[in-house]
Structures are given as C-alpha cells and as structure tokens.
Image (cartoon, rainbow, N blue to C red):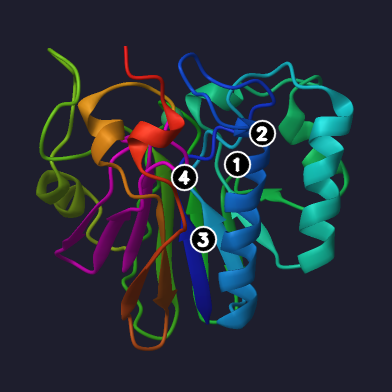
Amino acid sequence: MKAILVGDLHLREKAPAGRIDDFAQVQRDKVRQILTIAKEQRVDFILQAGDFFDYPKQKKDFIYSYVDLFKEFAIPIYCVLGNHDLFSEKTPLYWLKLEKVITVIEDKIELDDVVLYGVRPYGEIPQPENNNVMKKNVLVIHKMIGNEPQLLAQNIVSCSQFANQTVNYRLRLVGDYHFRWEHFENGWTINPGAVVRLRRTKWDMMLEPSVVLWSSETEEITWYKLNFKPYKEVFKDD
Ligand SMILES: [Mn+2]
C-alpha cells in the first residue's frame, strides 16, 4: 500500500498573529496540494499525525469547506488526536468524522498489508507482539519526539530512544514537533513537520512545509516539498 504522511495541520479560520497573507486561503491551498500529490501518486490513504484543527471553536461553514474538499478527492484519511483536538461533541473533528471524511485511529485498524495503531495524547503506546513482514505495523502518535528541544526545558524523547521503545513497528508517524526530521532505525520514524508556519520563531523561519510518501511494500520514502512563500513575505518583520 502507499500512503502520504502529513504532520500538524492546525486548520484555523483566523490568521495567527503577525501573518500578513490570506492565511485561511493559503492553508486551504496547502491541503489541496497534499490531496493532489496523494491523488497523483495513487495512494491508498493519507495518515495525519494530530492537531488537525488549531482550536476547537471553528465556524461550521469553515469546517464544511474542508468536508467538501475531502469529499472531492475521496481519499481515506486516518489521524490521531493531538493536544489541540481535545475531543468533545463540539470540536471540528466531530463533524469530519460524522461526514465520514476522516477516521480517528482509536485503537487499531487493519488494512491490506498494514495495521494502523493510534495513541491518544499522553496515552500509552500500544506494543504489538509481532513484527510481521507481511503485515506491517504502523504507529501514529502526537508526542514531543526529536533530537533538539525547541523550547527551554522541553520534555523530549530522542528519535533513537523512541525507535527502540517501539521495535515492533516498521513505520512511526510523529506529530507535535513542528520541524521536520526522519530517522531510520527499526524501520522509519518520520515527522513531516507542520504544514503551516504559525509563529515567528527560528524553527518556523526554517520550516519548509513538506509531506512524505511511504510504500509498505518497499518501505521507501519520498519527501515532497509544498509550494510556499518566503517567510518574510508572509510574516510582519517587527
Ligand atoms: Mn501542533
């Protein structure tokens, strides 16, 4: 099977402080670019690493504009909850679920030659007993993992440490850490990074919004950089 791996989306109607472009439009265009890559590469599904929406209160027509976009492409989307998606009846993800355009991986989902495992924020990581070459275990998790803290005293697990805590997976898709990285040890661990630049930090200044294509058959990955404008054109510079 083939999948496109997507990091934190943080969909939001209002522009973050300091952004001077038409943020909602730019963000929607990024999502369309991702769906187009997925369609062109004939993937079986899209995996998203949590923080699908930036905050729970979003207008219904904003949410439904994404429902329509996802229906247009009709590619299955599986995600986990991020700390920004705290789930209740009123959150935007509820509507995407109701409209059957996304599936939240609550526990595990078996597909062809892949088994998807999901973790709730701060939840315990499932440990499959087998590392089966015919049916590959894939973990989707929203957790602060990376080799360099982005904030002072940030509690962070290193990529290698994490790969060794989850040996029975062939792919781990990680969100939360907004800057992209990849790590190969016991299969791939991939953090595609955030799809949009939200803050005026050195990390966001360096961020090149990207997604990753993964094949369960070959376990090869390909990075796709999305179209984006230079940092200075989208943020105020004071
Ligand atoms: Mn996030």
The foreground one among 10 and 117 is 10
How far from the left and from the top, in percent, is residue 87?
67, 24
Mark 2–mark 1 CB contact (< 8 Å): yes
Q: Report, in whole angstroms, how far the alpha carbon at label 1 lies from the one at label 4.
A: 8 Å
Name the kind of residue labelled 4 in the image.
Val
Name the kind of residue labelled 3 in the image.
Leu
Disc tally is 4
Q: Secondary structure at mark 1?
A: helix
The earlier-in-sequence mark between 2 and 4 is: 2
Q: Residue at x 72, y 34 (%)?
A: 93
Mark 1–mark 3 CB contact (< 8 Å): no
Label disc, if present, on residue 109 of the rendered structure? none
**Would residue 100 be seen by someone viewing this image from the given angle?**
no
96 left or right of 25? right
Q: Secondary structure at mark 2?
A: helix
Name the kind of residue labelled 1 in the image.
Gln
Quarter of the image containing the C terminus?
Answer: top left
Label disc, if present, on residue 27 of the rendered structure? 1
Badge 2: few (under 14), some or many (20 or more) residues near its Cα, within 10 Å? some
The foreground one among 28 and 122 is 28
Q: Report, in whole angstroms, how far the alpha carbon at label 2 lies from the one at label 1.
A: 5 Å
Name the kind of residue labelled 2 in the image.
Ala
The earlier-in-sequence mark between 3 and 2 is: 2
Residue labelled with disc 4:
195
Q: Residue at x 57, y 51 (%)?
A: 30
Mark 1–mark 4 CB contact (< 8 Å): yes
Q: Residue at x 41, y 43 (%)?
A: 141
148 left or right of 231? left
Residue labelled with disc 3:
116
**Would residue 135 be seen by someone viewing this image from the given angle?**
yes
Q: Report, in whole angstroms, how far the alpha carbon at label 2 lies from the one at label 4.
A: 13 Å
- For ligand 1, give the image quadrant: top left
